[in-house]
Image (cartoon, grey):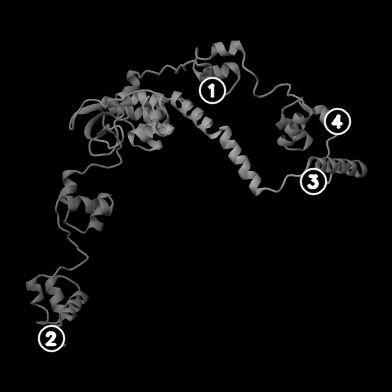
Amino acid sequence: MEAATDIRSTLLHGPYQAPRTRRGKFLACELRGKVKVGDYSDGPIPWPMKWGTRSIILCGDLIDAVKGESVSAIARNWGVSRKVVAKWRRALGVEIYNQGTTWLQHMTARENTTPQKMRELTMAARQVTRVPKPRRFKRYMAMRIRVQIERTGRPINPDHKLWTPAEDVLLGTKSDAALAKILGRTAGAIRSRRTALGIALSDPKNRPWTREEDRILGSVPDRTAARLLGRSERAVQLRRQVVGKPGLQAAARRWTPEEDALLGKLDDREVARRVGRTLSNVQIRRHLKGIPNPSPLRRPWTEGELALLGTMPDEELARKLGRSVSAILHQRAARGVPNPAPRRKYWLPREIKLLGTASDAKVAHMLGCDVESVKAKRARLGIPAPEEY
């Protein structure tokens, strides 16, 4: 275990070594398939990143770390966000409460529930609350309230109903939620009254675990065990971790030749719907097969479209090609094509010499611009208007 000042950064296993590679080589990423290595990350544990991006490649010891460590430890030691770690866990099929997460919750609970901290919280609460009443005063007030209720037959607070013997008989015969609908009370009120009278539920929701149920844990996947035992999958997972049994993942369904034939021919979402798989599963399979995306978000440029750059205004070309104006502007600037219709007039020395030699309308016609631009430029330079004005 690596030494750390914060338990949220503590790694239970390790040390984790980055794969030996260099810039320009290729690595197999569990999330994206075969990717090109760019630079290394600048986190506490440097790791190879995808070429041209800041995305860390999910490979090597990082896979073992994601399976066994907590989300906080992975995020802090690899310098990524918790959202990225959650995406890695989904890609690898890691359960929510693995060994690292369970250990971190246990240590955090121990730190936050020490006797000293509980005493500090109690003393702080006493300083802001009223002075506690003596026991004699409490007994006297309880007696007065009982006498008043017996005399009037109703509680002090009219919104609170008194419990009758007929209602007390029903306590524990059904669940608190079901009995609350019958008696017109809240489930919390039913539970408080039942607990005060020492009545247990005949069929409690959280029933104790038996030895026969514990034997089933770990022999089948948690989802199957939950269905067999009539419990929730979360309850089965927590109980399995308490008894120290490893989880059994459901066998991954293999890809058939018929399913592989659909990759690249249909949209990834349509393929996922037809074969009954998740979208990420289909995308990873297509990347591993080296099949290009049939419907990429960015449509590639053709030679004919590139030849039209600069031949007409960007807005008109965008409508003709069915692209955005920003895409036209970016592609034209990347290839050094000048703007055919600039919004601002850049004056050349030979054009400035024409100002004042003829009317502004004639000069605008010769230069191919509007009259207002000519008039504003002439006034800015202090050139007088021609005599024919």
Whole-percent x, y for residue 153 in the image: 90, 42
Task: Residue at 53%, 34% (x, y): give it.
Answer: 112
Task: Residue at 83%, 46% (x, y): give it.
Answer: 156
Whole-percent x, y for residue 161 in the image: 82, 41
Residue at numbered disc 1: 238
Hey, what amino acid is under mark 3?
A: Asp
Task: Left or right? Give the position of 38 relative to 84.
Answer: left
Q: Which comes before the other along the chain, label 1 or label 3?
A: 3
Q: Is residue 303 visible?
A: yes
Which numbered disc, 2 or 4, marks the residue closer to the eye? 4
Which numbered disc, 1 or 2, marks the residue closer to the eye? 1
Outermost residue toward the right in this view: 151
* Secondary structure state at the residue bearing disc 1: helix
Hey, what amino acid is under mark 4?
A: Ala
Between 263 and 63, the one lying in front of the other is 63
Task: Left or right? Give the position of 232 relative to 183.
Answer: left
Disc 1 to disc 3, how far (Cα)? 41 Å
Q: Which comes before the other along the chain, label 4 or label 3?
A: 3
Q: Which comes before the other along the chain, label 2 or label 4?
A: 4
- How would you rate the neighbour count of disc 2 (Cα within 10 Å): few for under 14, some for 14-19, many for 20 or more? few
Which numbered disc, 3 or 2, marks the residue closer to the eye? 3
